[in-house]
Amino acid sequence: MSRRAKVVTAAVVAVALGGGGWWAWKKKAAGKKAGGPAAEETDVEVSKGDLETRFRELGDLAAKNTIDIASKVSGRVVELTVKEGDRVRAGQKLAVIQPGKTGAEKFLPSEVTAPIDGVVLAYVKSGSNNSAVEFIESGAYVTGLFESQNPTYLMTLADMRQVVVKLRINEMDVLKLKEGMAVEVVVDSIPGAVFPAVVSVISPQAEREQRGGKIFRVEVALAKPDPRLRTGMTARVDAVLEKRAGALRLPLTGLFEEKGAEVAYLKPPTKDGKAKQVIVKTGMRTEMEIELLDGLKEGEKVLTEKPVDFEAAPAEELRKAAEARGMGGAGEQPAQGRAGRRGGRRIRMG
């Protein structure tokens, strides 16, 4: 697969542990005790704020339309009027080919002209990895279109009025994209520039890679041309997939799963108090946080480890909550697209 950037989504990663398949994920607190190891968080607070999941992917810039240039006749290149990188106009002379031999067999020279406005590029051999490039030299002999099904291509013209980013997206991520979706494109070699773009093409058919994975070809079209852009530049595509403003949110370290139901453990008001198991209903998930729809209120604190002794939620309510999530209350297998720690162990998203 080509270069990959991290896709920041609500992807789910299950880490199976013992004890009936409970799942775990430890999160260390940022601070450290003086001269000692990092301190672990013991509780986290429910708060309000914005949540969003994003799509990020690396691709290559390319011209939407390119034309490989060949001579109509076979012969020797006697004049080459352009070089790589030149911008040419439709009808402009690119090269002159001298067909035939000498004397009586000598034919009139044949001009090769540009069929479109564009930028002159070296010709890339079909199926190459962009390293096997060719740019014809003066004096070289070429085979013409009229005489062979495999003519000699002199160069390529790229129409840079419409630039795209070509992506290779795995089958798990491609359904997050839709044609017409607004995205932003950033090119590292042009610091500070952000190019508005839209998803223009999503291949309906997967391609199998050498390592066995499947990818879909996707094109992102930039809204406006820019003379600084070059084909082959690495570009980063960034899009907001989902966003919630002012959402009630909880760090994932405070979310657990009990018999298929999502739960949290309310921190006891006193050191000697007993924690309370609370069934929660969740919504949007990000890499680090989850949206709370029901069960907890802003400012409440929950534990980041399942307590040994706690006030359990009613079994019937746990069963109903599990069924609502499609877990059936069995708690033996995680729901597709979810991860965490079952049996009161922490749930991890991302």
Image (spheres, rainbow, N blue to C red):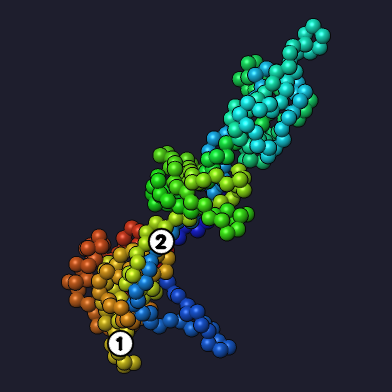
The three-letter code of the residue at mark 1 reads: Pro
Taking the spot 57% from the left edge, 59% from the top edge, the residue there is: 192
Q: Is residue 253 left or right of residue 195?
A: left
**Residue at the farthest left position:** 316
x then y, percent, for residue 107: 74, 11
Q: Position of residue 147 (x, y in %)?
A: 65, 15
When asked about the image quadrant of residue 110, the answer is top right
How many numbered marks appear?
2
Q: CA distance from mark 2 to mark 1?
A: 32 Å
Seen in the image, is 47 located left or right of residue 113? left
195, above or below 81, in the image: below
Observer able to see residue 336: yes
Kind of residue at disc 2: Thr
Q: Is residue 290 above or below residue 62?
A: below
Rendering coords of residue 343 (x, y %): 31, 72
Which quadrant holds the C terminus? bottom left
Q: Earlier in the sequence, mark 2 or mark 1?
A: 2
Which residue is depicted at the point 60% across and 33% down? 117
* Nearer-the-camera pick, 280 or 60: 60
Residue on which the image places disc 2: 53
Question: From this viewpoint, is residue 215 visible?
Answer: no
Q: Residue at x 22, y 71 (%)?
A: 318
Circle 1 residue: 268
Observer-nearest residue: 44 or 242?
242
Residue plotted at (62% across, 48% down): 228
Q: Secondary structure at mark 2?
A: strand
